[in-house]
Image (cartoon, rainbow, N blue to C red):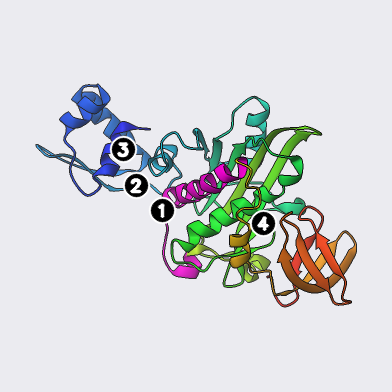
Amino acid sequence: MDKVLKLLLDRQGKFVSGQEMSEAMGISRTAVWKHIKAMREMGFDIKAETNKGYMLKDMPDLLLPDAIEYYLPEDGMVKRIIRYGSVGSTNEVAKGLAAEGCGEGTAVVSEEQTAGKGRISRGWYSPKAQGIYCSIILCPDAPLEELSKLTQLIGLAAARAMRAEGLEALIKWPNDIVIGGKKVCGILTETAAEMDRIHYVAAGFGINVNNGGFPGELAGIAASLYLESGKTYDRNRLLASVLREIQEEYYKYIGGRYSGFLDEVKGISATLGQRVRVLEGKREYTGMAMDILPSGELSIKTDTGVIKEVRAGEVSIRGVMGYV
């Protein structure tokens, strides 16, 4: 990552001498000054004082690969972060990169999406510089029947990162995170595979972070971390927290613990124990959500007393009363 930014972040609120920066980067102090000037033009608030050096006072409200990497472990799951100002969908970009040979651990982030994607051809509201829109390429050596659980793994990672911030984030099976009964995060995993081989998985997630409101009917079902807490969040730090949590569980997953995280998912489920409506094509029925099975399927006891096991890719789940 950018060595100047790392030095400034390491000592945020304190001065770093130009000489130290010069030695760390192997460049002249004049070149250091030009680097600082370029960072200021990007929006970094950097104070300079003679005989003291430079102090980072504030950062631009942008998703920046170097800033995200600062909070990630070295030699971890994330190998490369590619940033865009605007894309149609980070998942579409990630799938294109994967098809071109970009390896596992490539992450795509964007300040906005103009055609954000959700499950079952739904859209995802993705306004500029308010949320986190990220997709990461994964290439798990896992049985095809285990792939559907990756969506819930990503959801658990996102929920953990939010709960670490003191938010009561719950997982709405199979692919949403809710706080206070409203949706703050959606997950979409898309796979390219053959009968006996996985080429790649594009694991995408969108998080409503600092949104101050939502248009139209979304206002009744969507929320943001800001609206739920009254706090604004450093999106770089929060995204890094989600990626660290993904790494922790993904390494267990590719080690063969395909269902190891489901007990934790069940412990913070917004769906289990709730009456739900199941929309299965043109069919619809209601019942009680009873369990998440080792297969990742949701077990539902219908109002007629029949136990049904539903797969995430086949149905839409809605609460009988409200969104959850």
* Magenta-drawn stretch, dominant element (helix, strand or loop): helix
Which one is earlier in the sequence, the residue at label 1 or at label 3?
3
Is residue 71 visible in this depiction of the protein? yes
In-front residue for pair 31/165: 165
Name which quarter of the figure residue 107 lies in. top right
Badge 3: residue crowd in 10 Å (few <14, some 14–19, many ≥20): some
Residue that appears at 17% across and 43% down: 15
Labels 2 and 1 touching (C-beta < 8 A):
yes
Name which quarter of the figure residue 201 lies in. top right
From the image, tell me which residue sits under label 2.
Answer: 59
Amino acid type for the residue under numbered disc 4: Asn
Badge 4: residue crowd in 10 Å (few <14, some 14–19, many ≥20): many
303 is higher (above) or lower (below) than 218? below
* Image location of residue 59, percent across then percent down: 34, 47
Which one is earlier in the sequence, the residue at label 4 or at label 1?
4
Q: Is residue 38 left or right of residue 253?
A: left
Point out the stretch of residues depicted in magenta.
226-254
**Magenta stretch encompasses residue 244:** yes
From the image, tell me which residue sits under label 4.
Answer: 175
Amino acid type for the residue under numbered disc 3: Lys
Numbered disc in front, either 1 or 3: 3
* Image location of residue 139, percent across then percent down: 64, 34
From the image, tell me which residue sits under label 1.
Answer: 234
* Tag of residue 6: 3
Badge 2: residue crowd in 10 Å (few <14, some 14–19, many ≥20): some
138 is higher (above) or lower (below) than 213? above
Numbered disc in front, either 3 or 2: 3
* Image location of residue 313, percent across then percent down: 78, 52
Numbered disc in front, either 2 or 4: 4
- Disc 2, SS: loop
Which one is earlier in the sequence, the residue at label 2 or at label 4?
2
Q: CA distance from mark 3 to mark 4?
A: 35 Å
